[in-house]
Image: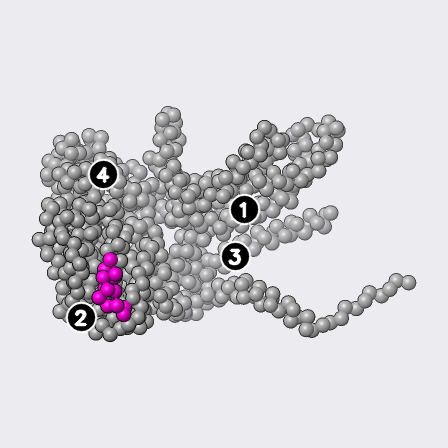
């Protein structure tokens, strides 16, 4: 998921912020030494170095350490293999790999955000499908692989899941005369709760959009609810004819009109335009805002800050009327793939598959609190009520994070600025839609090969 | 009878001696420049370039974000005369050698040596809608002056301009103060003997004496504003809200690095280069005229 990192096309993915509960959950599961049954592949014979460009810390604080521990354990098991761990910055994640791909030098394994940022290197022949090197019996255990599946092949391996629930402060709800145990389920419920909170001098919803990520999240959460299928957005952007830009623009207009109304009614914090996503999030644990959208990791951290009993979590209130209105906004966020120039792709695949062994999955949860993206991870390992509730939300329904389906350029140059235009009150919903139209036109003209690949992909998805 | 001028011998192998320097200059300056101009006529990424003629230049003029960026660069040029006047005024005061002038000079120079990233962080915090500046204004019952300095499309460019002035001012002060110290004291003393007032000494003696330094500073700052303020924009606003504070450098960064659209980014660089060249050309012409006038 794209979350803030703010780095503007520097991407911003779902970032869970805060040190998430590593300590709180450490006791829940016994950390086990990575035992090691290699999942698959024939890379055992490989002797040499694998360079791994990894990103994940801004989604899952602590995951770098977890990965380094896994690498050390793997190197112990395979003395002839050396894995060079190179953490990547959010701002340069896409650009650095693009440069590496041009010279076919750099990582043997790379991390990108899900779907378009991952499929694009595959289309540009810089990545190879991991499903060519890992048996289907193994990949069948991974969750969210549909985000990175093209031509029947899985391009990348997921590591963790991140969901974005609505959180509310029960104390502030109570102070406003609202039922502290009842989440606003519909949009009218949400507006009524906002009105009551505002009437009691409480900021109803606290977010930050200086970096454009709140707007991008609203797009991911709420435009999805207006769609009947993902094919609609793919068709509009890929210009395949089934769903026009005008139709897409109509949905966007509704979304930005809704956001403008929230601004106009004062239901968002007045400084939403001058805080970035992370800064805006701080309003909730500081009890300066009654509700927010945030990541699973932040919910758990905030639970520690203001008491788990004071936090409610639920799906975002229903606003849209499309067939996808009932999906939940969860994604693998980032994923790992093998580069086309890796000297021994099977060896790289063997290592990636090994990360999904049960011991490693448990260690991931125990050490970072992140939910592993694997069906073999036992839900029973989650014992605390709040994480259990989050895990249930993440796994109960079809999951979609719509931002993944945007070409990075469109995400960066249209999705983020259009939302900023609304929250900074410097433009109208129509002008926000015009940004999308202009940027998509520009992307089609400037990135002709990428556009054609997107178009073919959209057509193949039906 | 005057001796005829000695004819210089043409020594072809002398070119060998300058060849390394010529090659180094060509490699470090000419080649990148030629490549940038060449890329500006192509579309796609480095490994997959497609010739598109002047389409990238046409695309620039049809792209409102580029036009906004260009306009913002031009708006920010207004900071140059402001910082020049302020720097000159402060340098003249320091030149009067008021008590502690050396310490003041060091203090005003401090912002100039701060990294722009640190400035971005500090000013980002100070200038939030609920930041220190607005809180102080409200505490002083001046809430009417409080603004969303960086989050509003209206305020963001003047705010960035103010931060640039704040940082660059110290450089101007030090340059002008050094130039003023080099003005011969006899000139000032002679003027005073002739009955010139302090203001007249400054206006008619000191400022004209350092005119070339002032011109140099202004041209240098104008070039800086056109081509070296990326960091301010990146750390303060990342071009937002909604690209309202984008500048050409940021536009180049977004298109070239983030979007991989090397053609359009190169075209924007060529435009930027053209603008900077005009400024440099104007400055050189000014200097030449001044030299001719004696």
User: Of callouts 4 and 2, which one flags the residue occurring earlier in the amino acid sequence?
Assistant: 2
Which chain is mark 4 on? A
A343 vs B144: above or below:
below
Identify which residue is drawn at 76% across, 71% down. Answer: B9
Q: Around disc 2, counting alpha carbons within 10 Å, would you say few (fewer than 14), some (14 to 19), or many (20 or more)? A: many
Q: Around disc 4, counting alpha carbons within 10 Å, would you say few (fewer than 14), some (14 to 19), or many (20 or more)? A: many
Between the residue at mark 4 and the residue at mark 2, the CA separation in whole angstroms equals 44 Å
In the image, B161: left or right of A102? right
Which chain is mark 3 on? B
User: Of callouts 3 and 1, which one flags the residue occurring earlier in the amino acid sequence?
Assistant: 1
A196 or A343, which is in the foreground?
Answer: A343
Identify which residue is drawn at 50% across, 42% down. Answer: B112
> Do callouts 2 and 3 mark residues in contact (Cβ within 8 Å)?
no
The local secondary structure at tag 4 comes to loop
From the image, tell me which residue sits under label 3. B273
Q: Around disc 3, counting alpha carbons within 10 Å, would you say few (fewer than 14), some (14 to 19), or many (20 or more)? A: some
Is residue A148 something that shows in the picture? no
Between the residue at mark 2 and the residue at mark 3, the CA separation in whole angstroms equals 55 Å
The local secondary structure at tag 3 comes to helix
Residue A40, disc: 2
A433 vs B59: above or below:
above
Identify which residue is drawn at 54% across, 33% down. Answer: B104
* Numbered range of the magenta stretch: A69-81
Between the residue at mark 1 and the residue at mark 2, the CA separation in whole angstroms equals 61 Å
Which chain is mark 2 on? A
- Residue B91: image quadrant is top right
Q: Position of residue B74 (x, y in %)?
A: 49, 47
Identify which residue is drawn at 31% across, 63% down. Answer: A84
Pair 1/2: label in front: 2
From the image, tell me which residue sits under label 1. B221
């Amino acid at each position: 998921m794209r979350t803030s990192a703010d780095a503007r096309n520097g991407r911003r993915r779902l970032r869970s912020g805060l040190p998430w509960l590593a300590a709180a959950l450490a006791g829940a599961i016994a950390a086990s030494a990575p035992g090691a049954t290699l999942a698959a592949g024939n890379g055992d014979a490989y002797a040499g170095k694998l360079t791994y460009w990894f990103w994940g810390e801004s989604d899952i604080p602590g995951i770098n350490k977890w990965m380094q521990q896994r690498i050390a354990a793997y190197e112990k098991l395979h003395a002839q293999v050396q894995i060079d761990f190179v953490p990547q910055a959010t701002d340069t994640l896409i650009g650095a790999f693009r440069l590496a791909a041009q010279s076919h030098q750099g990582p043997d394994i790379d991390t990108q955000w899900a779907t378009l940022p991952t499929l694009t290197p595959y289309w540009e022949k810089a990545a190879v499908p991991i499903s060519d090197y890992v048996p289907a019996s193994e990949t069948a255990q991974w969750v969210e692989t549909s985000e990175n599946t093209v031509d029947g092949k899985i391009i990348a391996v997921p590591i963790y899941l991140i969901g974005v629930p609505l959180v509310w402060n029960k104390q502030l709800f109570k102070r406003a005369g609202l039922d502290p145990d009842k989440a606003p389920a519909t949009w009218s419920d949400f507006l009524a709760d906002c009105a009551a909170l505002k009437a009691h001098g409480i900021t109803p919803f606290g977010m930050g959009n200086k970096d454009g990520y709140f707007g991008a999240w609203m797009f991911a959460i709420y435009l999805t609810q207006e769609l009947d299928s993902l094919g609609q957005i793919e068709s509009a952007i890929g210009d395949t004819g089934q769903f026009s830009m005008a139709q897409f623009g109509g949905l966007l207009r509704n979304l930005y009109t809704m956001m403008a109304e929230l601004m106009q009614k004062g239901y968002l914090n007045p400084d939403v335009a001058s805080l970035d996503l992370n800064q805006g999030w701080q309003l909730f644990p500081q009890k300066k805002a009654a509700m927010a959208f945030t990541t699973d990791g932040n919910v758990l951290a905030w639970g520690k800050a203001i008491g788990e009993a004071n936090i409610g979590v639920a799906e975002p209130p229903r606003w849209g009327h499309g067939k996808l209105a009932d999906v939940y906004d969860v994604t693998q966020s980032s994923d790992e793939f093998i580069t086309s120039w890796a000297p021994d792709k099977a060896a790289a695949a063997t290592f990636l598959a090994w990360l999904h062994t049960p011991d490693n999955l448990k260690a991931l949860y125990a050490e970072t609190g992140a939910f592993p993206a694997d069906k073999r991870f036992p839900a029973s390992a989650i014992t605390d009520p709040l994480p259990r509730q989050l895990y249930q939300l993440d796994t109960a329904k079809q999951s979609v994070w719509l931002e993944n389906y945007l070409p990075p350029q469109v995400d960066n140059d249209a999705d983020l600025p259009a939302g900023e235009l609304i929250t900074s009150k410097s433009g109208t919903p129509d002008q926000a839609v015009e940004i999308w139209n202009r940027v998509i036109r520009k992307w089609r003209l400037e990135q002709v090969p990428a556009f054609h690949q997107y178009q073919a992909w959209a057509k193949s998805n039906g | 009878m005057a001796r005829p001028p000695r004819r210089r011998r043409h020594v072809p192998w002398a070119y060998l001696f300058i060849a390394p320097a010529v090659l180094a200059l060509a490699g470090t300056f000419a080649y990148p420049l030629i490549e940038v101009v060449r890329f500006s006529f192509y579309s796609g990424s480095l490994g997959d370039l497609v010739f598109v003629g002047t389409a990238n230049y046409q695309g620039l003029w049809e792209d409102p974000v580029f036009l906004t960026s260009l306009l913002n660069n031009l708006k920010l040029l207004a900071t140059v005369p402001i910082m020049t006047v302020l720097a000159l005024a402060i340098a003249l005061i320091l030149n009067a050698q008021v008590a502690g002038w050396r310490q003041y000079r060091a203090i005003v120079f401090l912002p100039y040596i701060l990294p722009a990233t640190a400035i971005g962080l500090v000013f980002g915090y100070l200038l939030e809608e609920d930041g220190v500046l607005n809180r102080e204004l409200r505490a002083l019952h001046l809430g009417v002056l409080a603004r969303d300095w960086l989050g509003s499309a209206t305020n963001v460019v003047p705010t960035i301009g103010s931060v640039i002035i704040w940082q660059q001012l110290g450089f101007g002060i030090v340059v002008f103060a050094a130039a003023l110290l080099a003005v011969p004291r006899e000139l000032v003393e002679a003027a005073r003997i002739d009955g010139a007032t302090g203001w007249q000494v400054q206006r008619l003696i000191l400022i004209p004496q350092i005119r070339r330094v002032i011109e140099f500073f202004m041209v240098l700052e104008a070039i800086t504003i056109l081509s070296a303020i990326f960091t301010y924009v990146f750390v303060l606003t990342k071009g937002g809200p909604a690209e309202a504070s984008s500048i050409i450098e940021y536009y180049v960064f977004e298109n070239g690095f983030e979007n991989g659209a090397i053609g359009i980014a190169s075209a924007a660089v060529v435009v930027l280069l053209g603008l900077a060249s005009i400024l440099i050309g104007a400055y050189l012409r000014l200097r030449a005229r001044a030299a001719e006038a004696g």
